[in-house]
Amino acid sequence: MEGAISTSFPIGPEAPDLFLDDRLLHPARHFGHPREVLADTTLDVHEKRAVLSSWASDAWAVESVPALRMPPGATEPVSFDAIMDALRQLDRSE
């Protein structure tokens, strides 16, 4: 059937890390502050950078205060500066 959507998912090394995907899309559901991303030993440097970059995205900016980020699942707003500080710390650790 042409145009059918696959419902199978790869298993093994090719399998997507669905938990990582959720941390990328919704960092505030998994981390209370950007420094928690830095402390997460299950993420490598590239994954940490991706999570922090996602969090810094303008998509999560508070409309009336763009310097604050409030993604779904966040318990409190996080400042853009806190996210950028974490990214700079990550850069220094490399």
Image (spheres, rainbow, N blue to C red):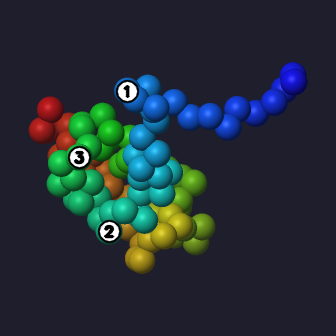
Q: According to the image, label 2 marks what residue?
A: 32
Residue type at the position of mark 1: Pro
CA separation in Å, label 3 and label 2: 16 Å
Residue 88 in the image, given as x and y percentages of width and height: 22, 44
Q: According to the image, label 1 marks what residue?
A: 13
Q: Residue at x 36, y 49 (%)?
A: 52
CA separation in Å, label 3 and label 1: 16 Å
Q: Which of the marked residues, 3 or 2, is nearer the chain's N terminus?
A: 2
| Image quarter (top left, top right, bottom left or bottom right) of the C terminus | top left
Residue 58 in the image, given as x and y percentages of width and height: 54, 52
Residue type at the position of mark 2: Gly
Residue 33 visible? The answer is yes
Position of residue 60 in the picture relative to residue 89 (left or right): right
Residue 66 in the image, given as x and y percentages of width and height: 51, 63
| Image quarter (top left, top right, bottom left or bottom right) of the N terminus | top right
Residue type at the position of mark 3: Thr
Q: Quadrant of residue 13?
A: top left
Q: Quadrant of residue 75?
A: bottom left
